[in-house]
Amino acid sequence: MVEESAAERNLAMEAVRVTEATALAASRFLGRGDEQAADQAAVDAMHHALRAIPIDGRIRIGEGAEKEAPKLFVGEKAGTGEGPRVEVSLLPLEGPTIVAKGEPNGLSVIAITSEGGFLDMPEVYMEKIAVGRALPPDIVGLDAEPAKNMRELAKAKGVEVSDLVVCILDRPRHAELIAKTREAGARIMLISDGDVSGVVATIWPDSGVDIYMGIGGAREGVLSAAAMACVGGQMQARLVVRNDDERMRAENCGITDLSRIYTVGDMASGDVTFATTGVTNGAMLQGVRRRHGAAFTHSLVMRSRTGTLHFIEAFHEFARLAGAGGQRT
Ligand code: VTB
């Protein structure tokens, strides 16, 4: 039998089912002040939903090493085992604090690609810069001054620097970046958590975000790159390693050159499917809206093979879902 490749099977709906189930489960913990419970619910739901999809998959970016994470660990099998051989990167809940506080931009995220398509990444920080599609190559750079990046981007988009919106995680470590961005004359959207949403927002004109900059998680970087790979967005990233333990973590992933700048293609290549469902409202997606015994979800799914981007609005009736082998959400 000829093995089916990821490219021949459109996994978009399967991927969305996983993020929908995860978002539904996490949404029960909105504003309850319990990050751990929200995260655990998301991990459990994603683990359950992932088992049912027809892939012969392995987790590449997961919840941690096998000894650290009982579920969704790196190297764990994903899917039914029948279907294309693929690898999976996931963030069941981006991020737990968002949901615990009822803040915006909470997402459930998964990406699937052909074997060898995702870069191994340690759980360390990563410096990132990202812009959307249809822009000249290397229009912005990780090492360029914010003023230059803003000037070039504004020129390419045919707008003034003062029209641009830069999304940045609201952290003390970004004080200088924020100051320089303001000095350059651009506008800023500070977010409390969830930098995947910030990167993904750059691909959609209506999101109001033109560029993402700053230091967030490295795992989040690979998932963001997967999204950018689907639509031709640009991203540059570099690990931020602060101590020996983090250096070891990087080495364990085969990374010794810590100064290396990664592009989208370095982090996510092959036949990529990216799916995300809103847990809370955000720049691109509505959060889960719960009704009596049911809920609405809003998701985005895209594929690098075609560059197509689908928004999926769904209605879920819990009793019927449970009857069909889903989880009670
Ligand atoms: C980001 C963001 C995540 O962590 O990666 C951020 O995308 C970075 O870490 O949602 P710090 O919180 O330590 O600054 C999250 O906020 C989740 O932990």
Image (cartoon, grey):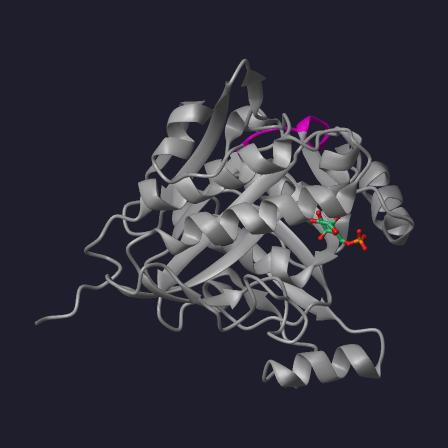
Residue farthest toward the top in the current orientation of the protein: 292
Q: Residue at x 64, y 66 (%)?
A: 69
Would you say residue 161 sits in the magenta stretch?
Answer: yes
Q: Quadrant of the N terminus?
A: bottom left
Q: Position of residue 255 (x, y in %)?
A: 62, 82
Above-or-below relation of 239 to 164: below
182 or 55, nearer to the observer: 55
Above-or-below relation of 76 to 176: below
Please report the bounds of the magenta region as a residue range.
157-163
Q: Position of residue 209 (x, y in %)?
A: 63, 33
Q: Taking 137 as reference, is 183 left or right?
A: right
Q: Position of residue 140 (x, y in %)?
A: 62, 52
30 or 249, nearer to the observer: 30
Q: Taking 181 as reference, is 160 left or right?
A: left
18 or 135, nearer to the observer: 18
Residue 230 visible? The answer is yes
Above-or-below relation of 88 to 35: below
Residue 202 visible? The answer is no
Q: Taking 168 as reference, is 324 left or right?
A: left
Q: Position of residue 210 (x, y in %)?
A: 61, 36
Count of numbered labels shown in the rendering: 0
Q: Residue at x 34, y 45 (%)?
A: 14
Would you say residue 171 sits in the magenta stretch?
Answer: no
